Amino acid sequence: MTEMLKLLEKDARYTPAELAAMLGKSEEAVRKDIAACEENNILLGYGAVIDWERTDEEMVTALIEVKIAPQRGDGYDRIAERIYQYEEVESVFLMSGAFDLTVILTERSLKEISTFVYAKLAPIEGVTGTATHFIMKKYKYNNRIFSPVIEQEERPLYI
């Protein structure tokens, strides 16, 4: 099942027939595996990776570091759940290191992101600090290369 999930993660457009051929299984077995993964919340959804820079839409992606005071009995979970309930929020991760959560969101402007931070995120009880970083250019995301690297003339590191 792991191989099937890896294939779907790379390209969710594979049909059960294509997956069956690649995995050496029957189409019916693949359909059952997919259904089981969906039922057990292993396979959470299907989506597209979009390079917004190639569209007419202006979009800004931010990575927000969030420091929080863990809640008795809930640790970080209650605050993380409150944050991920906001429609704007794409991702929330519990981190090790200098901050506790990473929050990722994409909006149409810097102002929309800053409004989210000061009006919704920072006032949450238990949030003790935030630091917002704007993603200036995406090179690779979810195993997708955004802008092909232009081949450069190879030159020595030291002259």
Image (tube, grey):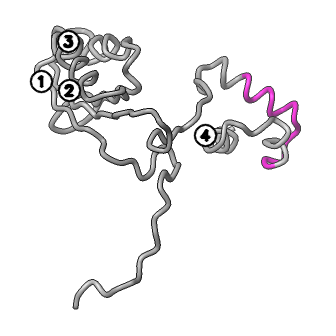
Q: Distance between the Cα atoms at labels 2 and 1?
A: 6 Å
Magenta stretch bounds: 22-35
Residue topped by disc 1: 129
- Are the residues at dot 2 and dot 1 in contact (C-beta closer than 8 Å)? yes
Q: Is residue 143 above or below residue 153?
A: above
Circle 1: element type: strand
Q: Distance between the Cα atoms at labels 3 and 2?
A: 14 Å
Residue topped by disc 3: 119
The label shown at residue 9 is: 4
Q: Nearer the viewer, mark 3 or mark 1?
A: 3
Q: Distance between the Cα atoms at labels 3 and 1?
A: 13 Å
Q: State which tag comes first along the sequence, 4 or 2.
A: 4
Q: Nearer the viewer, mark 3 or mark 2?
A: 3
Q: Distance between the Cα atoms at labels 4 and 3?
A: 35 Å
Q: How many residues crowd around disc 2 within 10 Å: few (fewer than 14), some, or many (20 or more)?
A: many
- Across and down, in percent, residue 6 comes to 62, 43
The label shown at residue 66 is: 2
- Across and down, in percent, residue 158 comes to 23, 87
Q: Residue flagged by tag 2: what amino acid is it?
A: Val
- Across and down, in percent, residue 24 comes to 84, 48
* Residue that sits furthest to the left in the current view: 128
Circle 2: element type: strand
